[in-house]
Image (cartoon, rainbow, N blue to C red):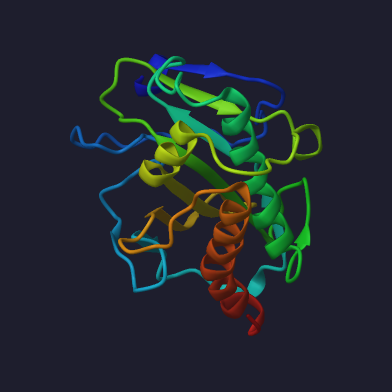
Amino acid sequence: MRRSRLLAVVLLFAVACTAPRARRSTPATDNSGFLDDYSQLRPGREGGFALVYRNPKADWTKYDEVLLEPVTLWRSGRKALDPVPEGDLLRLIADLETVVRRRLDTTFRMTDEPGPRTLRIRLAITEARETDPILDVLRGHGRDDVTKGMGPLHEETRRFIENAEIEGEIRDGATNELLAAGVDRRHAGSPPIATWADLDRGLEQWAKRVFAPLALRTHGTP
């Protein structure tokens, strides 16, 4: 199996409740392997994900709860990002999960249990390639156990942020049917991110850009 080459580094929380599903074989590409099937992705609209898939049969109006799985970071082997301080990587995971949860909480009831009215959301920060001999998944300590970043970003952290992508998928919490998936990256001409404050603002804007349309589809309000 393709996942047999995955070396998972579980720092605190393993998502044991994820329903098993077969992965489709796709030609070797520069994809990270986080999503099941990249072949269905298409270029997104301006302001949205760079690549996106939306299930045309999805009935978004029936969902009013969200199960947000812990955000992860995918890298090409445990030492692939050695120049980046490990604490910074954990902060990135925690910061992304915090802003997304805060954004979703304005419209949905957050839950830890899947159900028929529940959207199940997975997100990852990725800088890995499916063709690498080893993939390593970094999972956070938890949002409350990570010291908030302050001041300028480490040079290698800034370089990582410039090159990394955010991948995500939304599934039906009861049937596991794929409703949407996407890959996003920093757009050309985006403002530079030099400090943790810059990063926080950027993540807030990203969460609004991505999840406001979801709120509109499900509840009719951004």
Q: Position of residue 112 (x, y in %)?
A: 77, 46
Relative height, residue 27 to residue 103 (above, below) = above
Asked whether residue 34 is in view, the answer is no
Query: Along the line of sight, which residue is nearer the eye, 98 or 66?
Result: 98
Relative height, residue 211 to residue 92 (above, below) = below
Q: Residue at x 64, y 37 (%)?
A: 91
On-image quarter of the N terminus: top left
Q: Position of residue 9 (x, y in %)?
A: 57, 18
Relative height, residue 136 to residue 146 (above, below) = above
Query: Along the line of sight, which residue is nearer the eye, 21 or 112?
Result: 112
Query: Along the line of sight, which residue is nearer the eye, 33 or 162?
Result: 162
Q: Position of residue 170 (x, y in %)?
A: 53, 55
Q: Residue at x 71, y 53 (%)?
A: 115
Instruction: Specify the farthest residue to the bottom.
Output: 220
Query: Along the line of sight, which residue is nearer the eye, 113 or 34?
Result: 34
Q: Residue at x 38, y 55 (%)?
A: 186
Instruction: Specify the farthest residue to the front.
Output: 152
User: Is 209 placed left or right of 113 in the picture?
Assistant: left
User: Is 209 placed left or right of 134 in the picture?
Assistant: right
Q: Residue at x 56, y 35 (%)?
A: 72
Corner quadrant of residue 26: top left
Corner quadrant of residue 12: top right
Asked whether residue 120 is in view, the answer is yes
Numbered circles on residues, count: 0
User: Is 139 placed left or right of 52 in the picture?
Assistant: right
Q: Position of residue 108 (x, y in %)?
A: 74, 66
On-image quarter of the C terminus: bottom right
Instruction: Specify the farthest residue to the left.
Output: 27
